[in-house]
């Protein structure tokens, strides 16, 4: 039991250090760079999953994380920065971070788009000092198959989340335990 705990602790320290070393610090990317990469990621999503554009047309706002880095070996962590677009214009910047424990190993990068369908969900994001996914507005994660079967009459949830652009090897792209926090980004 002591060896397992020591190995888990070494794994935690290694993975946490690796994840945060790979991730861009909140102040490292300029606002222009973050907006450009977020806009490109959203355009890529719309091109690869045309039904996602339906969400974009109906959403009050879209929070795009163009690159989230996730790494884990027993203990894992993920982090990335993104832009909130309202009416197609950038209005704020956010960080998403999470830690996890369990059977996991690998490193990967992926993108996430959260479509805020209701004003109350967007208001919750904007007034909270860190939104922990699982509390507050309901979030439905759409995989490629679920997004393809979506129609304008089935859009009833507060927030829809779509993971896309995965690279690397690691299972799972869940939002459980993730915390989204407003950040300051330089010009």
Image (cartoon, rainbow, N blue to C red):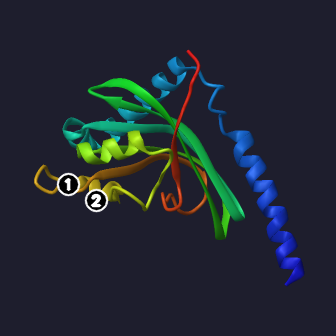
Drawn side of residue 173 relative to residue 62, left or right: right
The residue that disc 1 covers is: 150
State the image coordinates of residue 27 (x, y, percent, origin top left): 64, 26
Q: Secondary structure at mark 2?
A: helix
For the point 70% across and 64% down, the residue is 75
In which image quadrant can residue 184 be found? Answer: top right
The residue that disc 2 covers is: 146
The front one of 48 and 101 is 101
Q: Quadrant of the N terminus?
A: bottom right
Q: Secondary structure at mark 1?
A: loop
In which image quadrant can residue 133 be found? Answer: bottom left
Q: CA distance from mark 1 to mark 2?
A: 7 Å
State the image coordinates of residue 33 (x, y, percent, origin top left): 54, 21
Q: Is residue 12 visible?
A: yes
For the point 57% across and 41% down, the residue is 80
For the point 84% across and 70% down, the residue is 7
In which image quadrant can residue 85 be found? Answer: top left
Drawn side of residue 17 relative to residue 65, left or right: right
Mark 1–mark 2 CB contact (< 8 Å): yes
For the point 34% across and 37% down, the residue is 62
Count residues near mark 2 (Cα–Cα under 10 Å), then give few for <14, some for 14-19, many for 20+: few
| Looking at the image, residue 185 lies above or below residue 161 | above
């Amino acid at each position: 039991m002591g060896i397992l705990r020591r190995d888990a602790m070494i794994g935690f320290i290694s993975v946490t250090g690796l994840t945060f070393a790979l991730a861009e610090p909140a102040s490292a990317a300029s606002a222009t760079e973050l907006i450009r990469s977020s806009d490109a990621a959203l355009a890529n999503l719309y091109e690869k999953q045309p039904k996602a554009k339906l969400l974009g047309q109906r959403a009050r706002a879209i929070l795009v994380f163009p690159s989230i880095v996730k790494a884990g070996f027993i203990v894992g962590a993920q982090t990335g920065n993104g832009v909130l677009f309202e009416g197609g214009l950038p209005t704020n910047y956010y960080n998403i971070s999470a830690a996890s424990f369990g059977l996991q190993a690998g490193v990967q990068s992926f993108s996430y788009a959260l479509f805020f369908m209701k004003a109350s969900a967007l208001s919750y994001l904007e007034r909270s000092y860190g939104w922990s996914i699982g509390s507050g507005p309901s979030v439905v994660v759409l995989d490629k198959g679920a997004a393809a079967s979506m129609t304008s009459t089935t859009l009833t949830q507060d927030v829809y989340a779509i993971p896309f652009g995965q690279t690397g090897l690691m299972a799972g792209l869940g939002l459980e335990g993730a915390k989204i926090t407003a950040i300051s980004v330089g010009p």
